[in-house]
Image (cartoon, coloured by chain):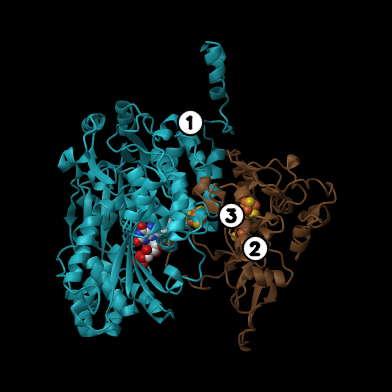
Chain colours: A cyan, B brown
Amino acid sequence: MKHKPAVNSSHAYSIDHECSIDQIRSVIAQNRSDHLLHILHALQQQLLHIPHRAVAEVASHLNLPVGQVESVVEFYSFFHNIPRGRYNILLSNCTSCGYMAGGKNLLQLLCQLLGVVAGRTRADGLVSVDQTSCVGMCDHGAAMLVNDRPIIRLDSGRIERIAALVNAAVPLEGWPEEWFDVDDNIRSSGLLLKDDLVAGDGLHAMIARGADATLDEITRSGLRGRGGAGFSTGMKWQFCREAPGDAHYVVCNADEGEPGTFKDRILLHSYADEVFEGMTVCARVIGSGQGLLYLRGEYRYLLPQLQAVLARRRELGLLGRNILGQPGFNFEIEIVVGAGAYICGEESALIESLEGKRGVPRNRPPFPVTHGYLGRPTVVNNVETFSAAAHIALRGSAWFSATGTGKSAGSKILSVSGDCAAPGIYEYPFGVTIQQVLEDCAAKDVQAVQVGGPSGTLIGKAEFGRKLGFEDLPTGGSFMVFGQERDLLAVAVNFAHFFAHESCGFCTPCRVGTTLLKNGVDKIAGGHGTHYDVDELKRLGALIKRRSHCGLGQTAANHLLDVIQRFPQVIEQRLAHSEFEPYFNLDAALEEARRITHRNDAAAHLE
Amino acid sequence: MRAEPKRDTAIPNTITIDGQEIPFSIGQTIMDAALAAGVYIPHLCHRPGLTPHGSCKLCTVSIEGRNVASHTADRRIQASSSVEIDSRSVSACTMPAMAGQQIRNNTPALNEVRKTITQMLFIEGNHLCPSCEKTGDCTLQAVAYHLGMLDGHFPQLSPRREVDASHGSVVLDRDRCILCELCVRASREVDGKNVFAISGRGIDAHLIVNSASGKLADSDLETGDMAAHICPVGAILIKEHGYEVPIGRRTFDLHRVSEIGLEPVILAKVRHTDE
Ligand SMILES: Cc1cc2nc3c(=O)[nH]c(=O)nc-3n(C[C@H](O)[C@H](O)[C@H](O)COP(=O)(O)O)c2cc1C
Ligand code: SF4
Ligand code: SF4
Ligand code: FES
């Protein structure tokens, strides 16, 4: 079963939660979607776990191998084979929206108040508390998910009230409604955020111009992917359109898992029509009848609203059969919700996940444009990319390329968070300097900025004149500010844990390497590191970066190598000044002996 | 068994590995071409005849020059690293051979990288070679010797993993599993079954048995299956046939891992003559 530390093995308790086969069958039967992830989510939600016997039931219901269902249950963070509490609370551990964001350990506080150990369900089955990777609420302070719903602006006061509500078993409907209100926080808007596009305008313009000419406009606009890699969107669509296949697919990547990124959340919340319109434009260009939007599990709360937008678009004739009266222009969009896995933002892992498998990146070539979803030609684009495409379809390439720089046309939506007075969404023309962004978000005494999230680049003061764009500093949208007070080594520890937790485990360098990096930086932060350990991290980091299978491993060491290179003093001051320190801590190992002999005098210590 | 590709005489279908020109046909990977020409590229998760996997990364090679086989889509690294590289790392077992590729393979630097990767594989599991029945027949061990690996270098991770001895004639000791998925693929592609799968994620990834109970006894694995014999390490062993070949006369006592076409020998060694 789950090869995790046996955190939850209170057997007496799990007997209470034995589920009958009828219960399992009825959950499966009532579920409207036949997607494996959706069925597993329904089971998790209603039975609080996915009982072992449900695995075989689901497998036979979907006609899948038992092993596939089990492996999926064990891959995604939001599925459990041991019951979670009726209140399942997950605190973000991101440096911006995490439980330490306000300087106080809210996870510890909540556990104390509820009498639970993090990761373990309380004996009465009422509540479980755990941590999870960034939930994309970084502009709203510390955040949690309780039964899939986000609560933001956590502080000790709110945590105390939450604990009281849980202990009194007050249903979520009875909790203060404003806690769940997540607003957009748009601080500055440009090309994409300034004016709403009237639903259908982009499609009308495309039909008037024709699909070929629309593709030309997209290509000529210089639009490049907003998910981080920056591949030309027009070229991607062209490759896909030219690829032979009995079906073509349009996939919108709304996995937004990079810590510190939340701009897609705003686009999905308030500009969903643009996103769907962009997908529909793409469908027409590449000749696709089916689109899929892969929504990260953390954003499940947006689902009803997104479904409503889709329904409205169907009513308006912007989706479905013969769109806008064009015979043969048929396109549908389905939403698939993830279940807690950063790697599923990587396009080929995302496709695997769409196909109901573990999110393991594929070998390339072949690329998704020729062999994507179900082996068919597939365009995968970021949420923001589709939104931009819809605007370009309406307003033309010149309108777009007039903004930005030579190689980075248009605007970029930034998610600004961390140590600044005005975190939120900022849309800038490409080419804006780091300094400018820092001034606009009222950040004072800045020590460093993490551009592009943990997988991106960490820069210090000397580089604040650098510009955002594919020529200089690319970013998928994450912009994390670290003030002078911030302990950059603690940040490095946080990021190293993030990558070790999110590595899919497919390839050796990343699977083992991210854990070794994590152990190494933990050792340094614990005051036991030496110069030898720093050299080891450098050597290991370089290897993981070059030899890993996918972008996760290839970027997992960036943050650490950046700290070592740009902020050597941060590491230096924590080093134990001996040539070599073993990982094994002799003094700590004597603790048990000291306890047994009731000694704690100097002679009972090695240090 | 591929159709003979049309040969364009203007562009010779050759790649160069460490200065040696090697022919290839369309559809071959760098590994295929190298092995066919008698050039050894260290590998663990690869086995001719099975779908290439690309997970162990032992076959990592460098392709020189920047404009070889441009990458479409993906990758968020691009400019995020300022370390300029004059070559690209690829997995030889999955990368298609393309005319003109200049490949570095048997270099001290690459073998050092491979040694580190092998050390990673050793320390992430529980490999106590002297007490393992596979010693001497183990490809992981042989690769380690080949690369001059003298120790694990990294602190042992010492994971707790399950042994499955439920099956009448096959034992699965996950302590030694290196997640190469050779058994997974052999079962699907050669045996026409689907006995194994990888489950979990990250450092907790582990091999599972595709049966309702998760036990080997409830699977349709048989000793005649390739999946029961293909394991490069001592994770899948045939019961009651231990130590039939004495130490000193085992596969890698008599052969080098770098010999080409050794697969039948390796398979024969672990396949008992009675079977
Ligand atoms: C580990 C990893 C995570 C990623 N996460 C995302 C993501 O959350 N959203 C996204 O759009 N792209 C993400 N990407 C990039 C995608 O692989 C892909 O390049 C992108 O979706 C293509 O869309 P674009 O061309 O519009 O940027 C990620 C890549 C990697 C390697
Ligand atoms: S680099 Fe990491 S995330 Fe990517 S395939 Fe390898 S193990 Fe998985
Ligand atoms: S059991 Fe052996 S063959 Fe199967 S994945 Fe593990 S190491 Fe590879
Ligand atoms: S042999 Fe190529 S990655 Fe394992």
In which quadrant of the rendered view does residue A34 lie? bottom left
Q: Nearer the viewer, residue A176 or A505?
A: A176
Q: How many marks?
A: 3
* CA separation in Å, label 3 and label 1: 43 Å
Q: Amino acid at mark 1?
A: Gly
**Within 8 Å: ligand 3 and the Cβ of disc 3?**
yes
Question: Residue A527 shows which numbered tag?
Answer: 1
* CA separation in Å, label 2 and label 3: 12 Å
Does any portion of residue B238 appear in the rendered image? yes
Does any portion of residue A452 appear in the rendered image? no
Residue at 32% over, 32% down: A105
User: Which marked residue is nearer to the observer: mark 3 or mark 1?
Assistant: 3
Q: Which residue in the protein does label 2 denote? A: B191
Q: Amino acid at mark 2?
A: Asp
Q: Which residue in the protein does label 3 denote? A: B196
* CA separation in Å, label 1 and label 2: 53 Å
**Helix, strand or loop under label 1:** loop
Pointer 2 chain: B
Horizontal side of B164 relative to B78 (left or right) equals right
**Within 8 Å: ligand 3 and the Cβ of disc 2?**
no
Q: Nearer the viewer, residue A153 or B177?
A: B177
Q: Is residue A567 above or below residue B181?
A: above
- Same chain under badges 1 and 2? The reply is no
Residue A409 in the image: state x and y as whole percent: 28, 70
Pointer 3 chain: B
